[in-house]
Image (cartoon, rainbow, N blue to C red):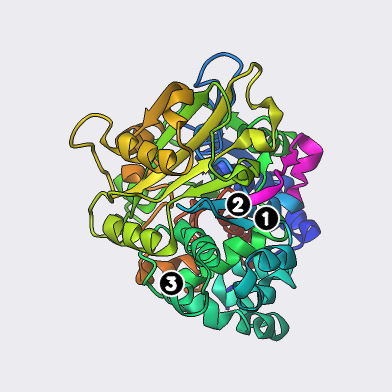
Amino acid sequence: MHQYTLDAATAARETAGRRAVVVGAGPNGLTAAALLARAGWQVDIYERAAQPGGSASTTDALGPGTRVDLGAAAHPFGIASPAFRELRLEEHGLEWRHSPFALAHPLDDGRAGLLHHDLDWTADDLGRDAAAWRRLHRPLTDHIDEAVAALLQPAPRLAGRPRTLAKLARFAPTALAPAAAIANRRLRSAEGRALFAGSAAHAFAPLGQPLTGAFGALFGALGMTHGWPVARGGSGAITDALVEVATLAGARLHLGHEVTDLRDLPGADATVLALTPRQIARLGGTDELPTRRLARWRHGAAACKVDYLLREPAPWTNPRVAEATTVHVAGDADEVIRAEADVAAGRLPERPFVLMTQQQAADRTRSDGDGVVLSGYAHVPHGYADWHDDEVVDRIERQLERFAPGFRDTVVFRRVTPPAQLEAWNPNLVGGDIAAGAMTSGQLLTRLGVAANPYRLGAATYLASAAAPPGPGVHGMPGYWAAHAVLADFARANR
């Protein structure tokens, strides 16, 4: 069985003088670069954009004095990431900020499901679902760090860890089940069912599909332990910390340098690609790589992103919703299930699943003036293009008006980024797919890392994007494990 770990002293001794090239300066590429540089490798990072960060970027897109996350905004996996913890990003300027509630899910009658920063508080708030909510989540919340570390690693590494497997076994019935079945059969309150289905919708897959239950339980458990925080000043602060760690270790960052042919890169012992499989298949100089297999990689549901500058906070019918960083604007569980099924079938839902992030509920630095920044996206079919102008935005805003009547009257300015523009900004977001690949059952197994070494594409070429295990999210773990695969391969070659 392939091992991915190597202690730092051995790595530095056995890999001194080695050179690595990393293509892509998003969180995964930067994480891989930082780890290799710390192990004594000479590392060069090539990024097509003028700024590093990929989907972890922040600008003043809504006007001077605003801070808008262009991609990921709330980070339940970021704060729990073993990679970020090992790199000690908080010592390099990263500061996590929390709102009173991790998540809110408003309902039509003025009620709302609220995810507290505690399992028992959340369960007690759900009334008749209290016991069921505890049964669903306690196997994770009681061992959250161990569970996250286990679930964010390639599957083969778990084989030799019987104690960890025994603990995860309690989670297996929930993880393997479709989220729709859990919401419909194990929960009874509208709030509990909506909270679970909304969390499961982060899978970007039909909620009747097996394994979607894992997303519902894991996202909920993270919120009730580590929270769903934002980075102070924007998600770009994560990137800034990673760049500092990598460059202090000696890595060199080359911006505005698009790689279209691997033969144009300087000679290196290892090439680490923080790109999607389809992008890699289109590169020149890939004769030794499995390009046919890479080209077959399927992309899934897309996001249509919208950022708002409001003159005042959104007027939620339930005022407690204003105290949550993340809001699922999606109606009840049945509506979420229908919307995700429509998207998977290539149809734009009449009432799409909309996720909004109220960063200022946790981080007052997002606007220097009186305005309020509100960012989010709707789930839409892959590569969806409006039949007419603002079709998706109109449906997003009708959802917002349902739960925050008068919302449109608060809008000063909106910035819309449909799927095609998302891909133009960041080519890793193929067709607007922010999950780097469809969450079909077959590809889910690939992303679990069932293969002996899911990171090695060729003799000295490695995959480090969100298409590699453990999948999407700003946590750096695909880059982390790709770097460890490089180190282990070269250590074994030396021996």
Q: Label 1, secondary structure: give it.
A: loop
Visible residue check, residue 205: no
Residue hosting label 1: 81
Q: Earlier in the sequence, mark 3 or mark 2?
A: 2
- Across and down, in percent, residue 353 comes to 40, 51
> How packed is label 1: few (under 14 Cα within 10 Å), some, or many (20 or more)?
many
Q: Amino acid at mark 3?
A: Leu
Q: Residue lying farthest top?
A: 64
Residue hosting label 3: 445
Side of 243 where 409 appears, left or right = left
- Across and down, in percent, residue 46 comes to 51, 34
Q: Residue at x 35, y 59 (%)?
A: 340
Q: Amino acid at mark 1?
A: Ser
What is the C-alpha distance between the residues marked 1 and 2?
19 Å
Specify the segment rendered in magenta. Answer: 86-102
Residue hosting label 2: 103
Seen in the picture, residue 238 relative to 451 is either above or below; the reply is: above
Seen in the picture, residue 269 relative to 491 is either above or below; the reply is: above
- Across and down, in percent, residue 196 comes to 52, 65
Which image quarter holds the C terminus? Answer: bottom right
